[in-house]
Image: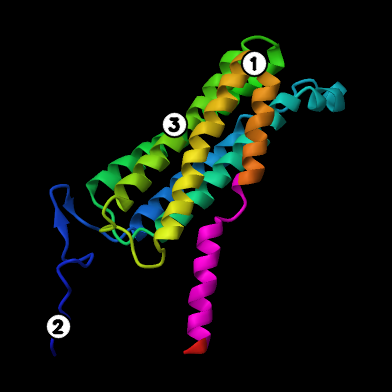
Amino acid sequence: MTQPVHAPGGPEGRATSFGAQRDPSRVLAFSDGVIAISITLLVLEIRPPRDTRHLLEGLGRLWPSYLAYILTFLLIGQVWANHHIMFDHIRSADRVVLFLNTLVLMDIAFLPFAASVLAEAFRDGHGQRTAVVLHGAAFELLAVLFNTIWWWVRRDRWLLNDTIDDAGVTAVTRRFRLALVWLAAGTALGAVIPVLGLASIGAFIVYYWLPVAGEISEAKRRRRRGHRA
């Protein structure tokens, strides 16, 4: 039986100075595992009240932990969703993508600690500015890494597949760049007024769950072409 011949530019035949390109499915699987563990660890930072004689009051005093849990959980969930959106369009991953994605996962694994610091600061009433800046900076670093990965894979389109056109690439690029500015502004605001900084980041969560317009229009065009065929 004749073996299939892969084109030199295909994911199996393309090799660069940064090593052979690999199927990104394993990258996604490993990333999903790290994200799932990190997001689960968040709830372990919520310590139950020791005084069960005044349990309701004790549970109420844990509101900073609930706030840090909800905020960080939704942010990590958003990171997970946008990570999948990005890798849906990555045909293959070289060593640069693997390294940058490892840094993404290292940052994500740090987030339960940042959430714990945030909760403790608001519970004690001290160090709130520092805690908000630490929390925001951790997500700002993720935005930097997302932008770097996306820049790397789109720079000559060798690592991108044909599921996204130039308009879609531009739409995703704008979305990721806006995250850089938004999170930096929220972090800076938190250094002055912690509550407003958290509110700004909370608004970021709402906006970034919206779909990428460029991707939706392209998907619709592909479906229409498929129906006509």
For marks 2 and 1, give the CA distance.
Answer: 62 Å
Q: Residue at x 59, y 27 (%)?
A: 186
Q: Secondary structure at mark 1?
A: helix
What amino acid type is highlighted by mark number 1? Ala
Q: Specify the principal SS of the magenta part.
A: helix
Point out the tag, 2 or 1, that comes first from the N-terminus: 2
What residue is pinned by disc 1? 121
Would residue 42 be found to the left or right of residue 15 on screen? right
Residues shaded magenta: 208-227
Residue 175 showing in the rendered view: yes
- Quick check: 125 above or below 36? above
Q: Amino acid at mark 3?
A: Leu
**Observer able to see residue 68:** no
Q: Residue flagged by tag 2: what amino acid is it? A: Gln
First of labels 1, 3 by sequence position? 1
Residue at the spot of label 2: 3
Q: Residue at x 70, y 22 (%)?
A: 195
Is 195 on the left-hand or right-hand side of 208?
right
Q: Secondary structure at mark 2?
A: loop
